[in-house]
Amino acid sequence: MIRLNLIDAAERLTAAENVAPVNVTSVADLRKKSRKKALTAALAALFVVVAFSCFLSVAGVPAPLQGILPAPYLSLIGAEDPSRSALTMGDGQRTSAGGMLEAQAAAAEAAIKRRDAVTVKQVVGEINPQVLFNNKRSEYNSFLPLEKISYQKASIGQFVTFLNTATPDDVGFSDCVFQAPNFYYVRGVAAKPVSQKSFLERIKTVSTDFRTPPLPENAPATDITAFGKFGVVNVNLQSVSSFVPTAEVAAEVKSLKALAVSNKVQLTGLDKPTVEEFGVYKRYSYKVTTPADFSDLQAFIAAYATSPLRIGVQNVEMKQAKRDLFSTIRFEMFVIK
């Protein structure tokens, strides 16, 4: 019995010796961990605020937050709140989002009052009427309709006159095209290389963007091919100063026919115009043909260019058909009621 008690006591002693020791927590360590957590949370919050501020400054205040965020904060980060910026008053103050309609109505009323307070004298004094009349139009596309007619008459007259005076006697043309305002294309042949060179040099001096394409291998050495822009000078853009009333169209066409007949030129096609509507005026286009030779056609065009006719020339195309010249002319006239 005693032995059993001793064995039991020994077992109890062994069990007590195997118990795990108790860990003692340090108060200093707890404080350090608490500070780290607080610092981490503060940095995270700061990052969120900075990121949010950057978003607002770039993209602006989103609709759900408009009128909520404080104005000093938005001003600091450079963000714009549409609900506030639209409500800027005349004295530089801003109203709340709830006063948007009132602010807009007040601003509109103030604008009406300022407009009504302006006198007619002030309005006339601020407008410079000369701007409407003194604007220089140096390009054909900027000309007024009647100015284009004036330019067309001058340009075709000068070009045909140049061909008549600058072309050597031994040079003949198979094609000659002139398109308003001053584009031309000529093709022909000269009897002698000297005549070819002389003509090309002359037409080059009165042209811009002048070109002579390379000749094909089978072309004669005296072949002439040239195109460019003819230099039109001293044009009176006021030579045609009025539209043609509808009641005077027939008389204007009759005058053109009479001028042609007086220069031995018969025109076909003046009885069927193509009419285009341009609102305040109409354009009557006539595609006319004539078998007149070059000397008669040149005399007619020279007389036409100096005549009071209110008719322009869009293009002229002269072609050699066998031994005769066949020309197509497109006349145009601006007509009002």
Image (cartoon, helix red, strand yellow):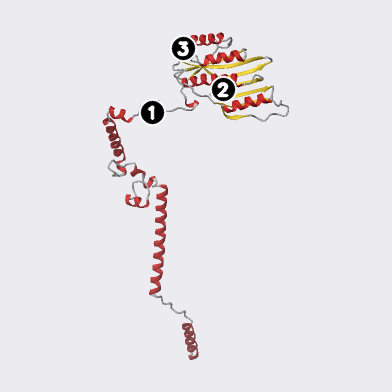
Q: CA distance from mark 1 to mark 3?
A: 32 Å
The residue under label 1 is 131
Nearer the N terminus, badge 3 or badge 2?
Answer: 2
Can residue 284 be seen here? The reply is no
Q: Which mark is residue 249?
A: none
Q: Position of residue 224 (x, y in %)?
A: 66, 25
Q: Position of residue 82 (x, y in %)?
A: 36, 43
Res. 171 image quadrant? top right
The residue under label 2 is 179
Query: In percent of the image, x 49 and y 9: which residue is there?
Result: 251
Res. 127 image quadrant? top left
Q: Amino acid at mark 1?
A: Val
Query: In percent of the image, x 52 and y 14: which residue is there?
Result: 304
The residue under label 3 is 246
Nearer the N terminus, badge 1 or badge 3?
Answer: 1
Secondary structure found at label 3: helix
Query: In percent of the image, x 59 and y 24: which residue is there?
Result: 184
Q: Which residue occupies the foreground of this view, 197 or 265?
A: 197
Q: Position of residue 72 (x, y in %)?
A: 32, 51
Q: CA distance from mark 3 to mark 2?
A: 27 Å
Q: Position of residue 302 (x, y in %)?
A: 54, 15
Q: CA distance from mark 2 to mark 1?
A: 32 Å
Secondary structure found at label 1: helix
Q: Amino acid at mark 3?
A: Thr
Q: Amino acid at mark 2?
A: Gln
Mark 1 near mark 3, Cβ–Cβ under 8 Å?
A: no
- Where 33 sits versus 200, above or below? below
